[in-house]
């Protein structure tokens, strides 16, 4: 007997739903890109320990810690959204996602204040090698953060379909959550590498 062919609806859902092995490949490649940034930073730090230490002391650990707390809270709310989606509760999923967006928007506000403060003090990517890495790494992360926020906004509109049991929409939510958790994890490394360097020195 030949296996029964999938229905047209199943075929469409299969084509449109994200492939989780592909998503993991993307996340791994993205993580490797950041790892290369981190590796080059550490090599340069060994060559200029005093410059890097003195420059790191000009960063605000308070800003870095605040943004860490913001992203961890946002990740927690996104995780709650995924749990609610698996339970088929579209209303809770939507509320958790909106709360995650609201809380996580604080990251951009803090970053804007931090960048403005640095530029006003005459600290730019051309100041020294430390600040070249600071702007490059945090800017690259900020780009990922904006992509993640866009994904969360997109997923809010998918919550009615999630409540209706649409597996495709739930798969997209789980894929978006994975990306958002990566944004959070990368920031924790950045916070430790850049902001805590001045404390340790």
Image: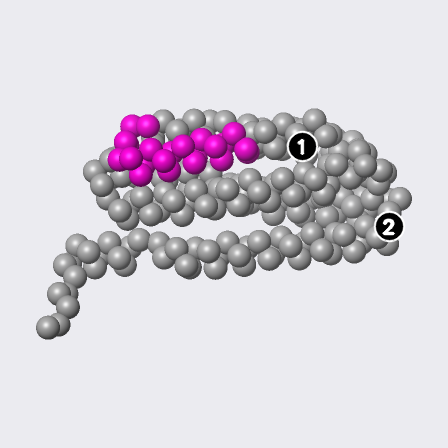
Q: Kindly tell me whether residue 148 is visible in this rendering.
A: yes
135 over 113 or under it: above or below: below
Which quarter of the image is occupied by the N terminus?
A: bottom left
Quick check: 191 left or right of 75? Answer: right
Quick check: 147 left or right of 11? Answer: right
Mark closest to the chain's N terminus, 2 or 1: 2
- Residue 186 position within the rendered picture, expressed as x and y whole percent measured from the top left: 60, 44
Which quarter of the image is occupied by the C terminus?
A: top right
The residue pinned by badge 2 equals: 48
Q: State the SS at label 1.
A: helix
Question: Crowding at label 2, few (<14), some or many (≥20) Cα neighbours within 10 Å?
Answer: few
Residue 182 on the magenta segment: no
Which residue corresponds to the image point at 36% horizontal and 35% vertical from the top-left? Answer: 83
The residue pinned by badge 1 equals: 64
| Distance from Cα at disc 2 to Cα at disc 1 | 23 Å
Which residue corresponds to the image point at 39% horizontal and 29% vertical from the top-left? Answer: 96
- Residue 193 position within the rendered picture, expressed as x and y whole percent measured from the top left: 72, 43
Q: Residue furthest left?
A: 1
Q: Nearer the viewer, residue 130 or 76?
A: 76
User: What residue range appears in magenta?
Assistant: 71-92
Residue 86 on the magenta segment: yes
Question: Crowding at label 1, few (<14), some or many (≥20) Cα neighbours within 10 Å?
Answer: many
Q: Nearer the viewer, residue 59 or 198?
A: 198
Q: Kindly tell me whether residue 125 is visible in this rendering.
A: no
Q: Nearer the viewer, residue 128 or 160?
A: 160
The reply to whether dot 2 and dot 1 touch (C-beta < 8 Å) is no
């Amino acid at each position: 007997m030949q296996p029964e062919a999938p229905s047209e609806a199943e075929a469409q859902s299969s084509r449109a739903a994200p492939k989780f092995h592909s998503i993991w490949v993307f996340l791994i490649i993205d993580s490797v890109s950041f790892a290369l940034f981190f590796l080059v930073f550490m090599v340069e730090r060994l060559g200029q320990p005093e410059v890097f230490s003195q420059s790191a002391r000009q960063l605000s650990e308070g800003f870095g810690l605040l943004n860490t707390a913001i992203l961890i809270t946002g990740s927690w709310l996104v995780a709650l959204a995924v749990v609610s989606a698996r339970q088929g509760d579209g209303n809770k999923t939507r509320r958790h996602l909106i709360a995650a967006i609201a809380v996580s928007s604080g990251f951009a506000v803090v970053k804007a204040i931090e960048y403005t403060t640095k530029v006003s003090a005459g600290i730019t990517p051309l100041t020294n090698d430390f600040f070249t890495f600071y702007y490059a790494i945090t800017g690259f992360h900020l780009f990922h953060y904006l992509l993640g926020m866009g994904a969360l906004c997109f997923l809010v509109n998918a919550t009615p379909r999630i409540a209706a049991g649409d597996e495709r929409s739930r798969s997209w939510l789980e894929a978006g959550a994975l990306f958002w958790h990566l944004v959070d994890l990368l920031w924790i490394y950045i916070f430790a590498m850049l902001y805590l360097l001045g404390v340790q020195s």
